[in-house]
Image (cartoon, grey):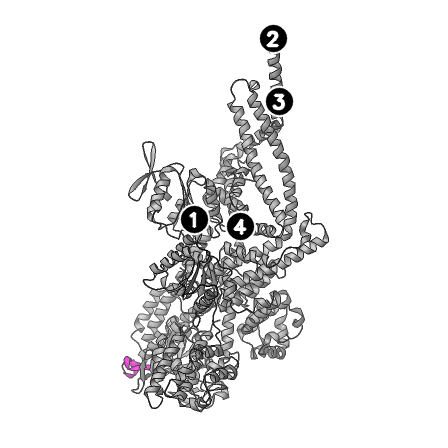
């Protein structure tokens, strides 16, 4: 027994020593951990409170704003409240919150994060924060995931068999059944691709509105009570990038913004670049990441295992041989892991150094993706997915060839390798950038291609440090000096608005003194200003050496914006390469090479463009055609939904191409198509392809296609050329020699048909001149031309002579006129036909300056094509009958639109920070509030006006009261909305959509409500205007000033500033009422006519006009009114001296002012024709001129003016001459 006792003792001693050895190394770490835990216990209250605030509020926001909330709001608030509590108690205290409190460490462990990364959660900081929110929120997460990174993680995270993950969508037939099963059994439900509304039947589940009966919980689902298992999990997911959910949804869920960040995407793309360029490093790095994640998880498991075994050991621990041996094995594994982990960390650092050499490629690529995501702000069709971007990114790397073999070292210390890697990165950046741009450009409208190229160039230059962000922002925003000072000699040739912009340039360092230089060298600068292609001319004085390429763009932006489009194209080409400004013809075969069974092609439909032949011809090359029944073309319309779905399903199984045309007509069905394509593409035949076509929506901000469908499609926007020559040849190409010869009068047919094709080319091409071309948008198309040609053929066959009047009426009033809704546009259309369709066609009629109608006796079908190709003069407004200024106006408007679109996408610089943007908004608010006038005292005004209303000026006083009432409504709304916004920015009110729209308008310097989808009401209460915010606000102050003077004594002005009225028509009606009372004529038997006086300054008006009124402040577009001796002899009209007649505009003088105009009330004459726009005189000496509020024309029509003309009225009709109440600046 003694020996046994000794042996037992020795064994116990040996086991004790082994136990001590096994646990000894842990003693110090555990002791340190105990001290840390005891210390942290005192800080737990504040840390948990901060973590709770993090989970509750942080989810919807971007990373910069999250940092702002945590560091500037939450932490200071908690510290302040704790300090207040302890100060009130009078006790000494230690702040019960960690100095560097981090919610991530409170909410999770490194092992948890490692497991998430292993389950495909991206390893960037935002994704880790979002993972904490998903796993720690007591409310169901509603995940905003446009790049589909979170859903990939959720699917893997919940992939265990016991979770039985079910992925469903709203509207799915078995949704409720699957939800019931998951609720009862504690499974997981993922509702993906949510819209902005959620079915009410799901609200009890979302709200966790459980009912307890006994020991069980129940939830009402429809009309059934379902068991609510405690392990049930619900995930709500949307692909929408900026959804707007109602407050009840936001309150009942945890909204989590999983939108990828620029820094996070850069890290992800860096891994992809290294994977392609250094597969050895990528493989080793991935293995190490997996190993390190595994080590972290294993260490946690081993530590827990040790503590568990020690805690659960029974009896004397030194007698438990199995336990001690298990602890020794655990310790051995732990030590081994520790050694390997340290080695792995060192290797990872070495790999990181090598990988960082490719950082510039990842940085550029991340910038490109975020530029792509911003494009949706200028058109809803421009939306792209991260998956599509990564494919283009991979293609850019692939076309760069294999990486240099010298990259096989890991230390990267050799200078040769440094040069090789640097050159390789340059090549990768160039190829990836061009591939991404070409991918984007293929789906862009022509009008937006230079915009995107310019934005890309500016962003790259700022990102690479080659330009200053503030200089780029100045170019985009422009500038105007409020008090520019005296112009000196410049007033002889420079517009005042240009001078304001020139003085604003002096805020840029290299432009110091440019205003003085212009004044001292006025002749040189005038000569430079008058050069047609001023961008190619040498800048006068010292500035030709001082200014760089960007500075020259700023100078043109200020002085010659019409030349900036050409200059920007040259700038982009010189900076990025000619491939960015010259596009190769569309290639259907290469586009098809980028498709797959999962990637449809989306064609944007334009007038004169049919993508069907492209698809059919390519299909025949691939052995797929309608003849072998593997290609089916369906024109969508009512009743075509079921056949289309059946064909998609069949071809997905058997292989084939389906083309679904005109899907914009089926906007309610297209979401079903999107879901169908997603389902069938999972296991579709490799030869399955889907082609979709649709017309773009009427407005760029409208949606007629689902966002998710547009993200997955390859987009093709291949517009036909819009120049006159291309339009003419394309129009003539619709016919054949047989068309001409089949007519009984072939010569007449040839001449009339060629003239008709010219007319078609002109009316289509005129659209590019904006509202001066056509005041509204009309969809003239090839169908109109073909029908007109058939009518022409029939009428020539049926008549002995050409029935010109009948043809002109049918063409102008029925066929092309059937599109036209505006009376003045109808006049323009008919005027063209009066000029083009007449007897002179057979005698060399001049269709345009330098382009005559050829003799049909000498021309056959092919000769007409050759004539059109060689005889048409260079493209210019003169071909359309417009003045060259129309081109200047068109180019100026194009420049303004380009920079407005860039500004709407966030600008071309590094973008303003949240604080900078907020400060800018507050500055605008303060500026408006400080200058906002008081409301008019309507009660006082009404009492003052009452005795005067029955007097001779009564109608004018009514107008004054109405104008004051309207101004009060506007002033009150401005005052209220700014006050509400101020409270919203301070957190005193919830930010409404109207407040957000107001902020956006302030940032864009846009009058609030101008965007038709804005909730602001300023625009609805104001007058029509094209001016920016500050210009229109200044305009409002002038209007208030006129009303104050008018209502001071209620004395009618001798000449009214007509543009300063909300409703100018009411004043003109008042003038007729006053005249009717004075003359005893019936008001409905009167109208107005206008006579232009020789008074250019309103101060020259000394008396009231007889039988009417004077108006001033108008502008004329498309022509001008002569001054002084040029006006010729004067004439007397009812005692008013009038002079002049319409004459051609001066070059670059787009909207010259008019003299004071005498508006006279006159009785209607029997020979005048009543029309919707006024009484038409049909007097060859009178041009019946439309008067509009703004250059937008169309809906802003006010009245018809009668202007004296010595030229044919047809000339001014073709030139689009109109009077405008306001200029655009």
Is tag 1's residue or tag 4's residue first in the polypeptide sequence?
A: 4
The CA span between labels 1 and 3 is 54 Å
Is tag 4's residue or tag 3's residue first in the polypeptide sequence?
A: 3
Q: In the structure shown, which secondary structural element does the residue marked by tag 1 occupy?
A: strand
Residue range corresponding to the magenta coloring = 1075-1089
Q: Which residue is mark 3?
A: 18
What's the mark number on residue 509? Answer: none
Q: In the structure shown, which secondary structural element does the residue marked by tag 2 occupy?
A: helix
Determine which quarter of the picture holds residue 571. bottom right
Foreground mark, 2 or 3, reads 2
Q: Nearer the viewer, residue 731 or 223?
A: 731
Residue 353 point in image, percent of width and height? 65, 47
Q: Rate crowding at label 2 as few (under 14), some (14 to 19) or many (20 or more) other CA atoms within 10 Å.
A: few
Q: Nearer the viewer, residue 194 or 328?
A: 328
Q: Which residue is mark 1?
A: 237
| For residue 877, above or below residue 646 | below
Q: Is residue 1081 magenta?
A: yes
Residue 506 point in image, percent of width and height? 60, 67
Q: Which residue is mark 4?
A: 64
């Amino acid at each position: 027994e003694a020996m046994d006792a000794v042996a037992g003792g020795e064994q116990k001693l040996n086991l004790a020593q082994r136990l001590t050895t096994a646990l000894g190394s842990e003693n110090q770490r555990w002791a340190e951990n105990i001290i840390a835990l005891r210390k942290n216990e005192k800080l737990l209250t504040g840390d948990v409170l901060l973590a709770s605030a993090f989970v509750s509020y942080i989810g919807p926001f971007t990373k910069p704003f999250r940092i702002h909330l945590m560091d500037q709001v939450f932490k200071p608030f908690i510290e302040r409240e704790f300090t207040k509590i302890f100060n009130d108690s009078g006790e000494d205290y230690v702040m019960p919150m960690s100095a560097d409190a981090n919610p991530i460490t409170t909410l999770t462990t490194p092992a948890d994060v490692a497991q998430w990364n292993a389950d495909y959660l991206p390893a960037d900081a935002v994704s880790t924060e979002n993972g904490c929110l998903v796993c720690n929120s007591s409310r169901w997460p509603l995940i905003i995931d446009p790049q589909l990174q979170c859903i990939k993680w959720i699917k893997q995270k919940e992939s265990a068999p016991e979770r039985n993950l079910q992925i469903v969508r709203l509207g799915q037939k078995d949704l409720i059944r699957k939800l019931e099963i998951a609720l009862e059994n504690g499974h997981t439900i993922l509702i993906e691709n949510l819209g902005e509304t959620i079915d009410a039947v799901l609200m009890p589940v979302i709200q966790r509105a459980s009912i307890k009966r006994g020991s069980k919980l129940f939830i009402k689902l429809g009309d059934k009570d379902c068991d609510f298992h405690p392990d049930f999990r619900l995930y709500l997911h949307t692909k929408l990038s900026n959804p707007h959910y109602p407050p009840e949804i936001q309150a009942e869920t945890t909204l989590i913004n999983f939108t990828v960040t620029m820094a996070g995407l850069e890290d992800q793309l860096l891994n992809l670049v290294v994977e392609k360029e250094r597969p050895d490093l990528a493989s080793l790095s991935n293995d190490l990441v997996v190993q390190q994640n595994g080590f972290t998880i294993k260490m946690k498991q081993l530590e827990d295992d040790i503590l568990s075994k020690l805690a659960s050991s029974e009896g004397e621990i030194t007698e438990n041989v199995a336990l001690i041996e298990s602890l020794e094995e655990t310790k051995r594994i732990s030590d081994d892991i520790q050694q390997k982990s340290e080695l792995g960390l060192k290797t990872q650092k070495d790999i990181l150094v090598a990988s960082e050499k490719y950082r510039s490629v990842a940085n550029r690529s991340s910038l490109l993706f975020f530029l792509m995501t911003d494009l949706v702000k200028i058109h809803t069709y421009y939306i792209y997915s991260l998956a599509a971007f990564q494919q283009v990114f991979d293609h850019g790397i692939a076309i760069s060839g294999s990486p240099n073999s010298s990259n096989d070292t890991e230390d990267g210390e050799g200078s040769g390798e440094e040069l090789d890697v640097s050159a390789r990165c340059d090549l990768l950046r160039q190829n990836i950038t061009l591939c991404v741009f070409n991918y984007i450009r293929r789906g862009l409208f022509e009008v937006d291609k230079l915009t995107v190229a310019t934005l890309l160039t500016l962003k790259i230059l700022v990102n690479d440090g080659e330009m200053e962000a503030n200089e780029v922002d100045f170019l985009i925003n422009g500038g105007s000096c409020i008090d520019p000072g005296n112009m000196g000699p410049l007033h002889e040739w420079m517009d005042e608005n240009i001078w304001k912009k020139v003085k604003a340039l002096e805020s840029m360092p290299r432009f110091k003194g440019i205003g003085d230089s212009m004044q001292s060298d006025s002749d040189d600068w005038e000569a430079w200003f008058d050069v047609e292609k001023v961008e190619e001319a040498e800048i006068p004085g010292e500035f030709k050496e001082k200014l760089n390429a960007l500075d020259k763009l700023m100078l043109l932006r200020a002085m010659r914006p019409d030349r900036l489009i050409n200059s920007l194209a040259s700038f982009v080409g010189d900076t990025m390469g000619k491939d960015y400004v010259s596009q190769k013809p569309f290639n259907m075969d290469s586009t098809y090479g980028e498709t797959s069974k999962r990637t449809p092609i989306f064609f944007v439909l334009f007038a004169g463009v049919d993508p069907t032949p492209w698809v059919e011809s390519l299909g025949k090359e691939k052995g797929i055609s309608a003849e072998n029944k593997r290609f089916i073309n369906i024109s969508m319309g009512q009743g075509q939904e079921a056949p289309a779905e059946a064909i998609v399903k069949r071809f997905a199984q058997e292989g084939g191409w389906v083309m679904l045309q005109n899907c914009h007509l089926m906007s309610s069905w297209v979401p079903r198509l999107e879901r169908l394509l997603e389902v069938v593409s999972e296991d579709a035949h490799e030869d399955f392809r889907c082609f979709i076509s649709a017309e773009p929506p009427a407005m760029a901000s409208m949606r007629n296609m689902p966002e998710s469908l547009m993200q997955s499609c390859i987009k093709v926007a291949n517009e036909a050329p819009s120049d006159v020559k291309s339009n003419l040849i394309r129009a003539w190409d619709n016919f054949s020699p047989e068309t001409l010869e089949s007519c009984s009068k072939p010569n007449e047919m040839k001449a009339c048909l060629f003239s008709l094709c010219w007319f078609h080319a002109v009316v289509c091409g005129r659209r590019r001149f904006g509202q001066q071309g056509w005041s509204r948008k009309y969809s003239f198309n090839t169908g109109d031309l073909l029908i007109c040609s058939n009518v022409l053929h029939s009428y020539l066959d049926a008549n002995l002579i050409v029935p010109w009047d009948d043809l002109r009426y049918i063409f102008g009033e029925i066929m092309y006129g059937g599109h036209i809704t505006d009376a003045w546009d109808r006049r323009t259309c008919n005027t063209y036909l009066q000029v083009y369709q007449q007897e002179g066609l057979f005698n060399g009629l001049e269709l345009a300056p330098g382009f005559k109608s050829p003799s049909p006796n000498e021309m056959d079908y092919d000769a007409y094509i050759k004539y059109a190709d060689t005889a048409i003069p260079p493209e210019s407004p003169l071909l359309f009958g417009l003045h060259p200024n129309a081109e200047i106006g068109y180019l100026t408007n194009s420049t303004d639109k380009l920079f407005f679109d860039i500004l709407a996408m966030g600008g071309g610089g590094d973008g303003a920070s949240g604080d900078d943007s907020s400060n800018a908004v507050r500055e605008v608010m303060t500026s408006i509030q400080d200058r906002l006038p008081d409301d008019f005292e309507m009660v006082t005004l009404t009492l003052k006006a009452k005795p005067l209303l029955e007097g001779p000026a009564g109608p004018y006083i009514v107008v004054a009261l109405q104008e004051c009432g309207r101004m009060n409504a506007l002033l009150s709304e401005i005052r209220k909305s700014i006050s509400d916004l101020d409270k919203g920015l301070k957190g005193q009110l919830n930010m409404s959509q109207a407040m957000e729209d107001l902020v956006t308008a302030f940032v864009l310097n846009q009058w609030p409500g101008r965007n038709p989808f804005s909730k602001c009401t300023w625009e609805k209460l104001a007058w029509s205007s094209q001016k920016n915010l500050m210009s229109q606000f200044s305009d409002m102050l002038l209007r208030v000033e006129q009303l104050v003077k008018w209502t001071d004594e209620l004395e009618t002005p001798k000449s009214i500033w007509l543009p300063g009225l909300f409703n100018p028509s009411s004043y003109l009606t008042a003038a007729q009422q006053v005249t009717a009372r004075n003359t005893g004529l019936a008001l409905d038997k009167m109208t107005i006519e206008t006579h232009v006086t020789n008074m250019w300054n309103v101060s020259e008006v000394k008396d009231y006009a007889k039988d009417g009124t004077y108006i001033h402040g108008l502008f004329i577009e498309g022509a001008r009114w002569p001054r002084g001796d040029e006006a010729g002899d004067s004439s007397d009209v009812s005692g008013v001296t009038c002079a002049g007649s319409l004459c051609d505009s001066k070059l670059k003088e787009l909207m010259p002012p008019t003299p004071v105009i005498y508006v006279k009330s006159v009785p209607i004459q029997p020979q005048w024709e009543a029309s919707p726009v006024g009484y038409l005189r049909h007097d060859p000496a009178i041009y019946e001129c439309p008067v509009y509020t703004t250059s937008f024309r169309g809906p802003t029509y006010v009245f018809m003016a009668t202007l004296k003309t010595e030229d044919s009225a047809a000339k001014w009709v073709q030139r689009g001459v109109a009077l405008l109440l306001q200029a655009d600046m």
